[in-house]
Image (cartoon, grey):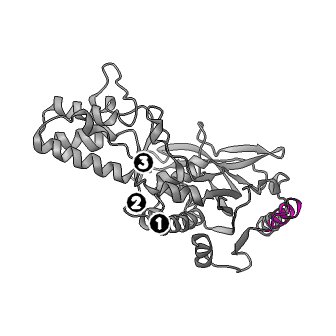
Amino acid sequence: MTTFIQLHLLTAYAPSNLNRDDSGRPKTALMGGVDRLRVSSQSLKRAWRTSESFAGAMAGHIGQRTRRIGVEYVYKPMQAANIAEKIAKSAAEKIASQFGKLKNEKNGPVEKNLEIEQLVHISNHEIELINQLVSTLIAENREPVDDEVKLLRKEQRSVDMALFGRMLASSPEFNVEAACQVSHALGVSAVTIEDDFFTAVDDLNNKDIDSGSAHMGEQGFASALFYTYICISRDLLLENLGGDEELTGRVIAALTETTMTVSPGGKQNSFASRAYASYALAEKGNQQPRSLAVAFFQPVRGDNHVPVAIERLQQQLDNFKRAYDQRASSEYELNVDKGEGSLSALLEFVRQ
């Protein structure tokens, strides 16, 4: 049976704007009849995947998510090596088109037309193969032949691809099913978005002549205690990583630590909205996974949300286990509010 690792996190943020909508205001969602502050799963995954902590722990095993494969890995290196424009452009088109359909906009700039239409995950192994091929093409001053541009690989997948998947409409045999599912982070209480009106003053103003502001603006902000749910299929992750048990354990531990310590980057310079999880519940077992978000359909009220939210999560876990007769899982809790548990012990629990 499949082994699942489920993480339930509570993370408190002071006034901030972590993830903006199309108008620049914090994202929200309606749940339990009231508006909640929201951070999208896309925002969370990008913050975690590109963070220094995850990159440092997974050095040498991370790929890229980009449209600019042909530009950055082929066209620019060949141009820098003084390869003829026609050869460099043709080589970039042939290689990039293996990963998706090229833009090819009429009268568009060369580099833009060498981009593929959709973002795609490309593994570090595939990047190495592209670099090797481009080095050969430069040395021999030529375009690639058809067999050389078949660079997609099923083996040696990067850890970010193994976790979050890959979809290639033109080459579905190289798709990767994501081993990690991430919920949108939702505030456990009702929220009201506030507005911050601000001005900026020119340091070189002559105050006798002009004492006004040089810029005026407005930005939304709000505060919330967020519940985030992450589900990892350990068996699928192991399969995606070619059966490498040691790497699989390292990936799970690195991702777990990152989810608890890395914040989305939205408006960080304005709000310094960096936070660690105040509470983490890790579950490990074979039962069908489920979120504990139902614990917060009735919004948390009162002055001290953290202990109330923790109690609700614990109660919801017990209720599900009793109702569905689930006793096979094991759990580990880190409760900063009570000084119980430690990050190192939690990481060891999910790693095993």
Q: Residues within 10 Å of mark 3 (few under 14, many from 20)?
A: some
State which tag comes first along the sequence, 2 or 3: 2
Residue 113: say if magenta. Answer: no
Tell me the magenta residue range. Answer: 314-327
Q: Nearer the viewer, mark 1 or mark 3?
A: 3
Asked where in the image residue 322 lies, by quadrant, the reply is bottom right
Disc on res. 154: 3
- State the separation of the CA atoms marked 1 and 3: 17 Å
Q: In this view, does 105 lie to the left or right of 85?
A: right
Q: Which amino acid does label 1 sit on?
A: Leu
Query: Is there a contact, CB below 8 Å, between mark 1 and mark 2?
Result: yes
In the picture as drawn, the residue positioned furthest to the front comes out as: 1
Q: How crowded is mark 1: few (under 14 residues within 10 Å), some or many (20 or more)?
A: some
Report the label total: 3
Prevalent SS, magenta region: helix
- State the separation of the CA atoms marked 1 and 2: 9 Å
Q: Nearer the viewer, residue 27 or 74?
A: 74
Disc on res. 316: none
Asked where in the image residue 92 lies, by quadrant, the reply is top left
User: Residue under circle 2?
Assistant: 61
In the picture as drawn, the residue positioned furthest to the right comes out as: 323
User: Residue under circle 1?
Assistant: 247
Tell me where residue 33 appears, x and y as whole percent. Answer: 84, 44
Q: Residue at x 70, y 58 (%)?
A: 226
